Amino acid sequence: MKHPNQVIIDLASLRHNFRQARAAFGDRPLLAVVKADAYGHGAVEVARALTDEEADMFGVAHPTEGARLRAAGIDRPILLFCGAHPDDAGELADQELTPMLFDLELARALDAAGRARGRVLPVHLKIDTGMGRAGFRPEQLDEVLATLAGLDHVRIDGVVSHLALADDVANPFTARQYETFAACVERVRAAGFNPRWLHLSNSPGLFGQTFPLCNLARPGISLYGGLPGESFRHLDLKPVMRFVSRIAQVNRLPAGSGISYGHRFVTERDSLVAAVPVGYSDGYPRLVTNRAEVLVRGRRIRQVGTVCMNWILLDVTDHPDVRVGDLVTLLGRDGDGLISGDELAGWAQTIDYEVFCSIGSRNPRQYLRA
């Protein structure tokens, strides 16, 4: 039996986007972000493809994500963006997973785990330069460095921060974040540490800014063909995810017919309405109700009526050749037509990151090999 809906991942487009990031960063090292199951694209398959492209490192959110990559044979360095609980220090050591460090209790636990194994364990010191999320504040840095200096089995392998407003290339706050970051790096070095990796750039930082101190960048959304922001529409990025279903029924309805829950759409003429077995349980956002368009045979067709758990409806009155079984593209390309992640996200009043994660995690995936 086949599921009626499918996510199709184009690995050739993924590789193309990675090469765009590599070129933008001057062929310097890249950490490919594959957290959240590679934004719904499948972390294992994405990591395998990008290993072939010589990705230098991978980034995930949690230890379980890193362990899954290790179990699949991924041997590149893996950085844990959300750190880890101190109780997991031994497993981090055994799996060779490197945490971003913003908790001294984890540092002490890693020191104990390293001592027990006769190893020095790497961390990337996370500095909060203005995101206000996770990381040591600059005013905490002296205390943090003094503590780490007393831990013989922990090594600062990198210093990292995260940009808050890089999608707005003209915003001066990004430059202030870089200045704060550079000053903190100097303090780390003055305390006797020699971090190998210095990194600040996400996708918008990579494509829109220059940070001379940094020798590693972390492309995420751009790998998957998503726009890092409005200022980046000129980038040569290709969509990686396509989401498709098929028409299950075509009904003739008279003028004045209410459609779907709440009758939020009423036909103004005798109409042909196609039913497609996909809905918000499949990650298709309910907020696109009466806003979205889909592609059938490469043509744009309007979605009408409330998006249901398992159904959407299409007004195909002007396309009487549409038949049961026709492929419906809800996201991605069909012929010359394209429903981009950015466009679908706009209808849903959200961002393409959320669209990719929601759709990709809830439907069977097929991979087109490069």
Image (cartoon, rainbow, N blue to C red):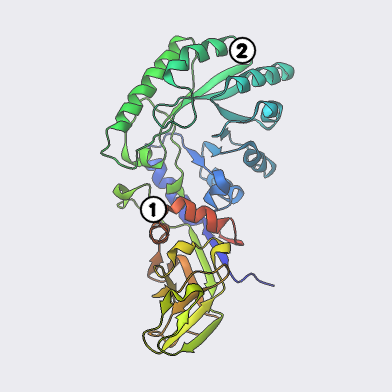
**Quadrant hosting residue 205:** top left
Above or below residue 140? Residue 162 is below
- Numbered tag placed on residue 237 in the rendering: 1
Q: CA distance from mark 1 to mark 2?
A: 44 Å
Q: Nearer the viewer, mark 1 or mark 2?
A: 2
Tell me the residue that label 2 is attached to: 151
Above or below residue 158? Residue 209 is below
- Numbered tag placed on residue 227 in the rendering: none
Is any atom of residue 370 visible in this view?
Answer: no
Callout 1 secondary element: loop
Characterize the local packing of mark 1: few (<14), some (14-19) or many (20 or more) Cα atoms within 10 angstroms.
Answer: many
Q: How many marks?
A: 2
Is 74 situated left or right of 177 in this image? right
- Give the residue type at disc 2: Leu
* Image quarter in which the N terminus is found: bottom right
* Residue drawn 54% across the image and 60% down it: 283
